[in-house]
Amino acid sequence: MTETMKIEDYLARGGRLTSPANVPARYRAELMKIMAIFVDSELAGAAGFADRINDAAGIEGRIAAARIVAEKTAHAGKVLKLMGEFGAATDRYVSHHPWTARLDRGAEVGSTRIDHDMRLSVFNYPLTGWADAVVMNWLMGMAVDIQLGELGQLSYQPLAETFREIRPTEARHTELAAAGIALLLSEGGEVQASVDYWWPRVATSFGRESSDKLAMLQGFGLRHSSNADLRAAWELRAGAALKAQALEVPAG
């Protein structure tokens, strides 16, 4: 960046930032929001899945589930460390929210809790048993991969690099969930009801179809694709994965 170029113009031309120094206030606010959503979602997701570890039928399933919980928590820690560089109180962050808190199972799609942290709304719903947990992690895992692909292009280079490092491990979690789905189906397990339940709730994790802030975020290099495009990519991928397992894609 030249001394005479405004930082906003630098970002709009594809520039990259590497430290909190001289970050514009609005850019900082939006970047902190991105990080908080990821950290809160990983911690809430790990907490919910931890409660289901002992529901797995075999030792291998329990080991895999425990590893997923540990790795998601570690991923949250990596991004939380970056939040600390921007002044976040990382020493109390993890204990500040009730990560296991959930809404009633029948709560409306997209609902949030009172005294809500910044987790994606999908993590406000409870898991009911092992099959339900595997389905949720499978569908959401495919969404996370698409979202991390987007986040890996962020103009704040340290965070973009962190998301790129995290993505392969999260993809492995999805592979484990897919293997779990195949096993459940081979044993005659019922998973379609869970697919029907989680499909619309995962879909909401992409946010509103249109966003008034999209142009601003694109100018900052904090977004590239629209919510609608990201959701469409997930629907295509997840739909194909369901059909490959002879499962139905929920309507709507």
Image: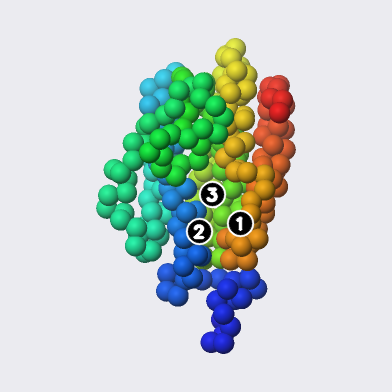
**Measured Cα–Cα span from mark 1 to mark 2:** 10 Å
Amino acid beneath label 1: Lys
| 71 vs 10: above or below | above
Residue on which the image places disc 2:
30
**Measured Cα–Cα span from mark 3 to mark 1:** 26 Å
**Decide: marks 1, 2 in contact (CB < 8 A)?**
yes
Q: Is the residue marked by circle 3 packed among few (<14), some (14-19), or many (20+) residues within 10 Å?
A: many
* Among numbered discs 3 and 2, the one appearing first in the sequence: 2
Amino acid beneath label 2: Glu
The residue nearer to you, when weighing 178 against 32, is 32
Q: Which residue is drawn at 62% across and 19% down?
A: 192
Percent x, y of residue 70: 38, 40
Can residue 113 be seen here?
yes
Q: Which residue is drawn at 49% across and 51% down?
A: 166
The residue nearer to you, when weighing 207 against 176, is 207
Percent x, y of residue 180: 54, 26
Location of the C terminus by quadrant is top right
Residue on which the image places disc 3:
167
**Measured Cα–Cα span from mark 3 to mark 2:** 21 Å
Q: Where residue 213 is drawn, which disc sits there?
A: 1
Q: Which residue is drawn at 48% across and 28% down?
A: 125
